[in-house]
Image: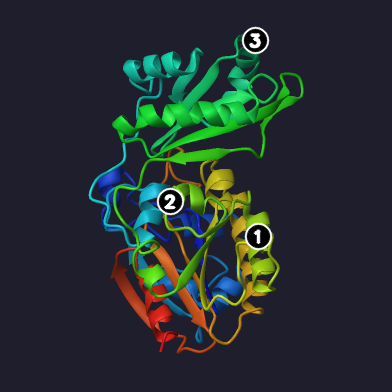
Amino acid sequence: MRYYLFVIDSFGIGADSKAAEYGDEGSNTALSASLAIPGEKWNFLQKLGFGNCCKMLGFEPEGCAASSKPIASYGVLQKNSEGKDTSTGHWEIAGMKVSFSLTTFTDEKNSFPKKLIDDVEKITGRKVIGNKIASGTEIIQELGEEQMKTASLICYTSSDSVFQVAAHEKVIPHEELHDICAKIRLICDSYNIGRVIARPFDGDKETGFFRTKYRKDFSIKLPGPTFLETILPDLGVITVGVGKIDDIFNSTGINISYQDKGNNACLQRVIEIAEGKYDKEQDYNDTTDKQLIFVNLVDTDMEFGHRRNSVGYCLSVDNVSQKLEEIYKRLKINDVLAITADHGCDPTFKGTDHTREYVPLLIFGQNRENGLNLGIKNGFDNSMKDVISWAKMNSL
């Protein structure tokens, strides 16, 4: 039996009660994305009750109205932790009590402290260029040629607590860049930076530079325990991470990891898991009693939210909706399908930052009561608490 928990990255549903503290009052990722394309959309999410989640906050997405008979139970979650980043969002989903904010860098130029840059140059033996807030796709166009000539490191940050490092594959192969980022991770620990991210790229100045598939995240050591390593193992639950889940949790509490890149690859992986097909059969026993399939769908955030592409965001959600229906059709009697998010990233809001928003919670199970109004709850961990209840119920 399996519990499929999907995090549609950045799919927030409206500014929460702390949004004003972050300058995010008035943001609404789902509404902005829905308005980008007229007409009916996100049909399976609509059937589940996504519009019902939104209606609880006083709006309905364009083309995804509340259902009179939603097939899933539906609710709204507010984050208890500070911040609006990927790491603390997922950590709270998994039950961690995060009592601090990870460090973000807000200066557009010379974003990182001089000592941090000096230490990076010393430990890597390479010059740092960039050192600013930037779009990853734009900064490699700007500095890619210089990086190739100087064999330097393009270092930049964003709204998240991140130290990103880009280098051309033909100058610094991705394996070497991964080793470099592992060293930088040690320096960044003392600055409380959430993730160091290796961003290898290829191409040339004439045709354009492009990022390759060899991104790798190096997360800060988890500041506390999660349900993945405490409660769930005691209940006999095997956790399978799909996408960047393993990176976010620094491999802690993840039994099996499929680090697929992009939504299509991640969703296809889950379909294959639902059908009993695995790449890691030597590690994965299909007769395991209970499995949590924990999935991050990153494209909505990385490809469209940060790039302020509301049309692309809308289409990406539609693709997710269609694929989720395929997974829904493969559910077995004691399986559960649940959907939530980790923060917002309103594609029509100011800047390119994440936005502090409520997130949806949709839960459907073949062998449970569905269509319930779960209310507005404090804590993203309410999604994982349902996993625990499911595991306990199926232990009887």
Mark 3 to mark 1: distance in Å?
41 Å
- In the rendered image, which quarter contains the C terminus? bottom left
> Secondary structure under badge 2?
loop
Residue carrying label 1: 280
Whether label 2 touches label 1, CB < 8 Å? no
Residue carrying label 3: 149
Amino acid type, residue under disc 3 in the picture: Lys
Say if 222 sits above or below 199 in the image: below
Q: Which mark is residue 249?
A: 2
- In the rendered image, which quarter contains the N terminus? bottom right
Say if 226 sits above or below 276 in the image: above
> Secondary structure under badge 1?
loop
Name the residue at 40% across, 24% down.
Answer: 108
Could you say where residue 215 lies in the image, as x and y percent from the top left?
Answer: 59, 38
Amino acid type, residue under disc 2 in the picture: Phe
Could you say where residue 296 lies in the image, as x and y percent from the top left?
Answer: 53, 56
Residue 40 visible somewhere in the drawing: no
Query: Sequence-wise, which precedes: disc 3 or disc 1?
Result: 3
